Amino acid sequence: MKFVTQDWIKRSAIIMLVSVFFSIFLWSVELTQWAGLINANSPEPHGEPKAIGLLVIAISFLKITILTLVPALICYGITRVINALKRYVKVARTA
Amino acid sequence: MEQTKNDRENNQTQRSLQNKSWKDDLSKTRFVMNLWLLVGFVLVCAPRATGIALHEWLSVVFIVPLVIHLLLHWDWLKALPKKFVGKLSGESRFNAIWDALFYLAMLMVILSGFLVSEVIFPLLGIPLEILPVWSKIHHDLGNLLMPMLGIHLAMHWPWIKSMTKRMLTKKTNQIADGISSNEVVK
Ligand code: HEM
Ligand code: HEM
């Protein structure tokens, strides 16, 4: 735990301060024309479905798994292709 | 100066205390904390399963492992400004840009989450007019975080693989050290 607690008060304070600083900037999105357009054109906020069934839970976690794993696999595939190409170029150069 | 001293200490600790508790080893501490972070992220991403009230409280608690994740990469963060000036491998540069975008997206989701809060803010008695634009941002970016995490994890797959092996075996001395992101930076 010493790695987490090392100088943690100062460091966490810096992280939080930087985050609050950026948040203020991000908040200003509200003032843009784009935000105004969305606010003006949106229907009344819909009530969230209250029922929490087993199926809803299963679908939620399935959605997270797919949305995370599919891009992960594609990205991993691309890094392997890039590394293979690099190795190929290296071998071709030295040959 | 301080950074190199810390690094040296960490590396020494890693070598001499391989069989001790995970708390004495930087990579193992990262592994354990990353697991908490992942569990937290999955729970926070399923508001329909947890219900909105739990979603809001879990998201606030989730800030703790998130800050710990950054604390455990403090040296990496400190080196970040230099990274763009110095000559770096394409992969490290991609990681730096991706992590910065991921950080901003996460910040925006948390900020917009507070601005559409249906439980915490009313409980605190803070009047809040929920603007549709924040609902849209929270909904769209919240869903975008999952593929962003997928790419974040894929970029660290070699570390995840070797560390999982290391955590699962007792004879840690015989297993090659996990590729600590600390070492990648250097
Ligand atoms: C890492 C942080 C967070 C993530 C990843 C996240 C993710 C999500 C997702 C995916 C949804 C569902 C949208 C949908 O498909 O219907 C949602 C809804 C919601 N979240 Fe979050 N959230 C986070 C933080 C927060 C925080 C801090 C709060 C408030 C304190 C919050 C309040 C809400 C509310 C009230 C809803 C339902 C209202 C709506 O859909 O507009 N969230 N969140
Ligand atoms: C939300 C869930 C997240 C999970 C599960 C996760 C997981 C991981 C893993 C497994 C690693 C590699 C191992 C390590 O060195 O610890 C890593 C590295 C890292 N993560 Fe995350 N992470 C998450 C979110 C974030 C966010 C939001 C940021 C924001 C900046 C971030 C920044 C970093 C950095 C800077 C590194 C080191 C990068 C490097 O060495 O190239 N992570 N993360």
Image (cartoon, grey):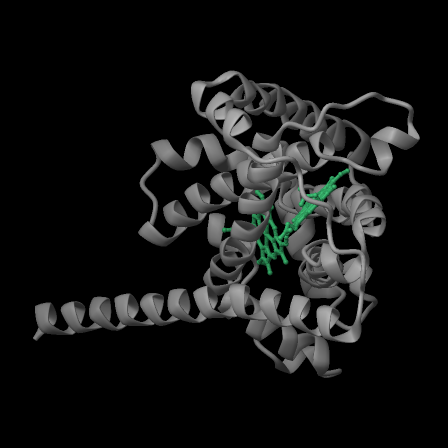
Image coords of residue A85 (percent x, y): 21, 69
- Taking the image as drawn, is residue B33 in sight? no
Can you say whether A14 is above or below B84 in the image? Answer: above
Q: Position of residue B170 (x, y in %)?
A: 75, 82
Residue reaching furthest to the front? A43
Question: Would residue A53 be visible to someone looking at this image?
Answer: yes
Q: Is residue B155 left or right of residue B54?
A: left
Residue at 52% x, 51% y: name it.
B144
Please indicate whether residue A31 sits to the left or right of residue B51 in the image: left
- Judge by depth and name the residue closer to the eye, B62 or A41: A41
Say if A33 sits above or below B52 in the image.
Answer: above
Write down the quadrant of residue B160 in the picture.
bottom right
Residue appearing at x 47%, y 59% in the figure: B151
In the picture, measured across the screen, residue A36 lies left or right of residue B10, that is: left
Where's the N terminus of chain B, which quadrant? top right
Q: How many marks?
A: 0
Q: State the residue in front, B64 or B93.
A: B64
Asked which quadrant contains residue B115, the reply is top right
A67 over B104 or under it: above or below: below
| Nearest to the observer: residue B20 or residue B54 | B54
State the image quarter where residue B178 is shown: bottom right
**Which residue occupies 69% across, 78% down?**
B172
Tell me the residue at 80%/62% (across/down): A51
